[in-house]
């Protein structure tokens, strides 16, 4: 019984350990899922919509910036789709700080080339291990 409790507690801490990162980027709790319109991608820095596992290019860039929203990270286009991370996350002027309300809603995912149906984006997302078919399940 004690072992089961330890496993549950460790599992919860692992699952919940990265959740504060969503508070460290503008609209971190409301990033659209480009694979399933109308749904959200909770693990913004990961290849899986739920988070955990492999990081996507935005996740690596966020880590490179010390898990901090910086003007430099805001101005990058980590997924190569022609929009800056700030534009995609609702901070086009790169002025958002933790605790503020972003000036705009998040319109795209900064770690997934979108629209996902474009041939160029399909190739990029495949190279980055983003598979929208798998992301649906």
Image: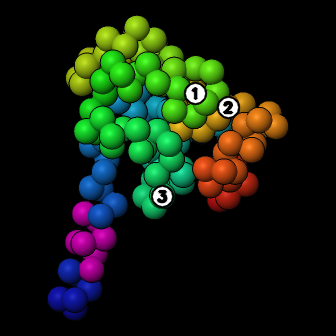
Q: Which residue is mark 2?
A: 114
**Number of callouts:** 3
Across and down, in percent, residue 15 comes to: 34, 61
The relative height of residue 30 versus residue 72 in the rendered view (above or below) is below
Which residue is pictured at 26% across the width and 86% down the height? 4
Q: Which residue is mark 1?
A: 108
- Secondary structure type for disc 2: loop
Where's the N terminus, which quadrant?
A: bottom left
The relative height of residue 7 versus residue 12 in the rendered view (above or below) is below
Which residue is pictured at 30% across the width and 35% down the height? 65
Q: Which residues are magenta?
A: 7-13
Whether pointer 1 and pointer 2 mark residues with C-beta atoms closer than 8 Å, the reply is yes
Magenta region includes residue 11: yes
Name the N-terminal-most of marks 1 and 3. Answer: 3
Magenta region includes residue 30: no
- Comparing 118 with 49, the one in front is 118
The reply, left or right, for residue 119 in relation to residue 112 is: right
Which residue is pictured at 27% across the width and 32% down the height? 68
Which residue is pictured at 74% across the width and 44% down the height? 123
Across and down, in percent, residue 43 comes to: 45, 47
Where's the C terminus, which quadrant?
A: bottom right
Main SS, magenta region, reads helix
The reply, left or right, for residue 27 in relation to residue 116 is: left
Name the N-terminal-most of marks 2 and 3. Answer: 3
- Comparing 102 with 76, the one in front is 76
- Secondary structure type for disc 1: loop
State how far apart marks 1 and 2 are (Cα).
Answer: 7 Å
């Amino acid at each position: 019984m004690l072992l089961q409790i330890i496993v549950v507690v460790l599992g919860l801490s692992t699952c919940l350990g990265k959740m504060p990162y969503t508070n460290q980027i503008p609209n971190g709790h409301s990033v659209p899922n480009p694979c399933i319109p109308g749904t959200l991608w909770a693990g913004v820095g990961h290849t899986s919509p739920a988070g955990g596992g492999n990081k996507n290019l935005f996740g690596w860039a966020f880590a490179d910036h010390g898990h901090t929203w910086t003007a430099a990270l805001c101005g990058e286009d980590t997924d190569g789709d022609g929009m800056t991370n700030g534009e995609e996350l609702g901070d086009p002027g790169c002025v958002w700080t933790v605790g503020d309300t972003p000036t705009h809603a998040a319109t795209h995912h900064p770690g997934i080339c979108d629209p996902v149906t474009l041939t160029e984006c399909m190739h990029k997302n495949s190279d980055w291990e983003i598979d929208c078919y798998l992301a649906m399940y």
